Amino acid sequence: MNLTLHVWRQANAKDKGKLEKYAANDISPDMSFLEMLDVVNEDLIAKGIEPIVFDHDCREGICGTCSQVINGIAHGPDDLVTACQLHMRKFNDGDHIFLEPWRSRAFPVIKDLMVDRGAFDRIIQAYGYTSARTGGVPDGNAVTISKVNAERSMDAAACIGCGACVAACPNGSAMLFTAAKVAHLGLLPQGEVEAARRVRAMVEQMDKEGFGACTNHYECEAACPKGIKVTFISRMNRELAKTLPMAHI
Amino acid sequence: MILDGKCPTGPIEKSWDKHRQDMKLVNPANKRKYKIIMVGTGLAGGAGAATLGELGYNVEAFCYQDSSRRAHSIAAQGGINAAKNYPNDGDSIFRLFYDTIKGGDFRAREADVWRLSQVSNNIIDQCVAQGVPFGRDYAGYLDNRSFGGAQVSRTFFARGQTGQQLLIGAYQALSRQVKEGTVKLHERKEMVDLVLVDGVAKGITVRNMITGEIESHWADAVCLATGGYVNVFYLSTNAMGCSVTANWKAAKKGAFFANPCYTQIHPTCIPQTGDHQSKLTLMSESLRNDGRIWVPKKKEDCEKQPHEIAEQDRDYYLERKYPSFGNLAPRDIASRAAKEQCDDGRGVGPGKRGVYLDFDDSIKRLGQKTIAERYGNLFDMYEKITDENGYQRPMRIYPAPHYAMGGLWVDYNLQSNIPGLFVLGEANFSVHGANRLGASALMQGLADGYFVIPYTIANYLAQVKPGEVKADHPEFKKSKEDAEGQTKKLLGINGKKTVTEFHRELGKIMWNNVGMARSEASLKEAIKRIPELREEFWTNVKVTGVGAEVNQQLENAGRVADFLEFGELLARDALHRDESCGGHFRTEHQTPDGEAMRDDENFCYVAAWEYKGTDKAPELHKEPLKFDNVHLAVRSYK
Ligand SMILES: Cc1cc2nc3c(=O)[nH]c(=O)nc-3n(C[C@H](O)[C@H](O)[C@H](O)COP(=O)(O)OP(=O)(O)OC[C@H]3O[C@@H](n4cnc5c(N)ncnc54)[C@H](O)[C@@H]3O)c2cc1C
Ligand code: SF4
Ligand code: FES
C-alpha cells in the first residue's frame, strides 16, 4: 500500500509545532502501525531528514508507552488496541493518515508525538498503593477474596496508564485512570482499609495536575485500549461521597 | 582464576537462614546516610528500590522509560512459581529446588537456587498484601496452574497479565517510598557508564534522554537490575529498548560476564511474517497446558488447511517423544523439537517456519467458554496480530529469542567481582543454569529485590564509610568525557547505513550461527563476521540530529554499538563450551536421537569472562559447580 502521512512535528515544549506531509510507500498490511513508522523513519534518515519521534517500548500493548492520536482517535481506529497493536490491514491503499500527540494541559509535548505523562505517576504517588511493608505479611490464603471481587479488581487493574482516556476526553479529565486504581485496590480487603484516604488524596492530586473535570462524555471508555469501564468512575464518586462530611449526617 | 561464589556451607535447608544471621547490620539511624543507586525499575529493581527505601536508605532509581511502571517485566504473561503446595499435589521447597536445578541442566548454583525456592512463598504473600489480584477459586483461595518442566501446579497468575500485576505492585510500593522521600526516581535517564574509584563501584554516568545532558551520580553502592540482552538477536520477545548496555559498560570496567551463551529460545511465539518485523510476540507457555502441538506427518499436507488433515496424518511430536511431559516439555526441548520438524520440511504457514498449537480437543472436552476464561486475552492477541481465530483453527507458533540466563557474575550476596556493584534479576547469571523453567524469572526478580538484596547489601555497607566519594571526584569527570566523546563520534560519522540496518545484520549473524543450534564452524564464522560488522559500523553508520535533545537514533546507536561488542563474547563463550547443555546446543554433542549431551567432567563450571579490550580475546575464569543435594544426572523428560 502507499499512504500519505500528516505528522505533527514539534521540536520541543516551547516550539509551536506544525503538521508535515510524508509518503509511506510499499507498506504491507501485516505491519503494525509502528513498524510502518519505522519504515518511514528509515526513509527520512536516508534523505537526511530527522526521523519522527514517537514513544514506544514493548510493542505488544502492555507497557502503555506508545501514545498517538491517529486520525483524530487516541490509539487509532481499531477497538481495544494500543497504537503498537494496530495493524496496517485496517487501512486502505491511498489513505491519508493524521498523526498527533496526546493533547492535554497536564501532558506537555516533549517532541513530535512524545508527551510527558509524569502527572499519572504523581497521582499514584499520592496514594495509589496499599501500605504493606515488605516481609512479615500474612499468608496469601489467610484472607480469602471472592472470585467475583478478585476478577473485578483485575478488570480495573488492567489499566496500562497510557493516557488515552485523557487524550480522548474533551475536558482532559483523568477520572478513568484514577478510578481504575481506586477500584483495583478498593475491591480487595488488603486495600479497603485505607480506601477513604486514598480516594481523597488521589483526587486532590488529580486536580492539582491540571486535569479537567468529568462531565460524562464516555469518550474515555471508548478510547481505552483495555476496556476499562466508566462504571468505575461512579464507584469512585461513591467512595468520594463517603469521605465528605455530609455522609456522616 | 578460580572464582569463589561464597556460598554458605552446611546443610542446604539452613543455608540462607544461617547466612542471614551471620551478616552484619546497618544501624537504623545510619541507614539514611547511605546512598544506593538502583539502575532499573523492573521487578528486581522496583522491588529492590522500594524495599531499600522502606528500610531507610537513601535510594535513587533510574530507568530509560518515561515511567518506572513501564519496565519490561510488565510484559510477562504466564505466571510466577512458588512452593506453596496449596493444591496438595506433592510440591515442596525441595521439589521446586530440584526442578529448577534439573531444568537448568545442572549449570546453576545449588545454594542460590535453594534460597530462591525458599523465599518464593514469601513473594506470593507479599504480592497479595500489595493488592495483586491473583486468580482465585470460588471459595476465595488462590488458584494455580502448571507450566513447562514441572509436574505440579505451582504457578500463580493474574489472568495473562501476571508480570504487569506484579510490577504494578512493586511500582506502587516504590511510589509510596517516593512520597515518603526515601526514593528519588530518575525516569528517561539511560546509564551509559559505571564509575569506579580505586576499583570500587561509586556511581554511574547517565544520559538525560530529554535534554541530552550527560550527568554524574554518586552512591555508596550501585545495583544493576537492567534486564536481559537477547535483543542481540535483533528479533526477540523483548521490548525495543532492552539492551546489554548497562551490563556491558560494567563488564568493560572489570565486572566478569558469566555464561553469556546461555540464551533461551521460547517455543510459543507467533511466527515471523516478513523483513519489516521489529519484534516477535510471545504467547504464554501456559497455553501448552491445554493446547496440543503437532505438524503434518507428510510434507505434501503442509499446504492444506489444518482441518483437512486427518488425525492419523498428524504428528503430535512432543507427546510422541516425551510421553511423561508431552506438550509441557521444557522450553529448550520444545524449541529444538519444533525446529527439527521445520528443518525436516514439515513446518506450516507462510515461510514454513511454524507448528500448530491446537485447542480443538480441549474445547471439545471443556467447552470454548472455559478455554476463553483461561486464555482469552491470548486468543485476542493472536487474532490481532495474525488475523486468524485460534478457537476455529489451530494457532501457529515458532521459537524466538526470549530470555538471558547469562549475565554479570555475582556471588551468593549478589555482589559482582567489583566491590560495591550488585546485580539483580535477569541482569545477573545466578539461578537458572543453562535453561530457565517457566514462571521462574518473575520469582527470581522479586526474590532478589524484596528478600535478598536488602540483607546482603547491608553486610557490604556496614563495612564502608558513607558518602566518602562524591560526584566531584575526577573519575566522574573522566567517565563523563568518555560518554560525551562517544556521542560526538557517533554523530560525526555520517555514513550511509542506519542503526537499524546494522542491528538487523548483527541479528542475522547471531540467529544463524549462535541461535538454537551451534557448531564449531558456525561459531567461528560469527567470531569472524561480528568484528567486521563492528568496524563498518564505526565508519559507516548514519545517526541524524544532535546530542543535546531527544534523539532516539543516538540512543539506539549506543545500544547497538554495545551489542556489536557483546555479540562476539557470546559467540566466544559458546565456542569454548564444547558440550550441549540446556539452551546451549552444540550440534557436535548430541545423542543419536538428537538429545543434548552434557560433559560434566570438563564443563561443570560457570564461565566468567574478563574483558581485555575490544579487539583482544577475553580471559576465562571458572567457578566450579558442586552438586551435593541433587545428583548430577542425565536430564530426561521422557
Ligand atoms: C514477553 C515475555 C513474557 C514473559 N513471561 C514470563 C512469565 O510468564 N513468567 C516469568 O517468570 N518470566 C517471564 N518472562 C521473563 C521476565 O519477565 C523477565 O525476565 C523479568 O521480568 C526481568 O525482570 P528484571 O527486573 O530483571 O528486568 P526488566 O523488567 O527488564 O527491567 C529492566 C529495567 O532496567 C532499566 N534499564 C535497562 N538498561 C538501562 C540503562 N542502560 N539505563 C537505565 N535503565 C536501564 C529499564 O528501564 C528497566 O527499568 C517473560 C519475558 C517476556 C519478554
Ligand atoms: S484507563 Fe484505559 S485509556 Fe486510561 S490510562 Fe488506563 S488503559 Fe489507558
Ligand atoms: S509500545 Fe507498549 S503498549 Fe504500545
Image: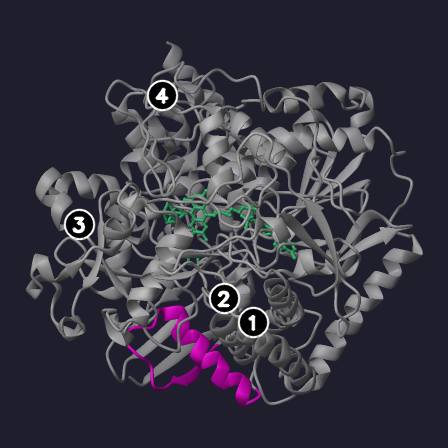
Can residue B65 be seen from the camera position used here? yes
Nearest to the observer: residue A56 or residue A237: A56
Q: What distance separates the C-alpha of mark 4 from that of mark 2?
A: 44 Å
Residue A36 among those drawn in magenta: yes
**Dot 2 and dot 1 within a common chain:** yes
Sequence-first tag of 3 and 2: 3
Question: Relative to residue B264, is residue B169 depicted above or below?
Answer: above
How far from the left and from the top, in percent, is residue A210?
51, 46
Q: Secondary structure at mark 2?
A: loop
**Dot 1 and dot 3 within a common chain:** yes
The kind of residue tagged 3 is Phe
The mark closer to the camera, 2 or 1, is 2
Please name the residue shown 24% across and 53% down the image. Answer: B380
Q: Which residues are magenta?
A: A19-48
Nearest to the observer: residue A66 or residue B428: B428
The mark closer to the camera, 4 or 2, is 2
Residue pushed farthest top? A249
The mark closer to the camera, 1 or 3, is 1
The kind of residue tagged 4 is Tyr
Q: What distance separates the C-alpha of mark 1 from that of mark 3?
A: 40 Å
Q: Is mark 3 within 8 Å of ligand 1?
A: no
Mark 2 and mark 1 residues within 8 Å of each other at the beta carbon: yes
Q: Crowding near pointer 1: few (<14 within 10 Å), some, many (20+)?
A: some
Give the residue number, with chain letter if any, for mark 4.
B86
Give the residue number, with chain letter if any, for mark 3.
B359
Q: Secondary structure at mark 3?
A: loop
Sequence-first tag of 1 and 3: 3
**Dot 3 and dot 2 within a common chain:** yes
Circle on res. A126 = none
The kind of residue tagged 2 is Glu
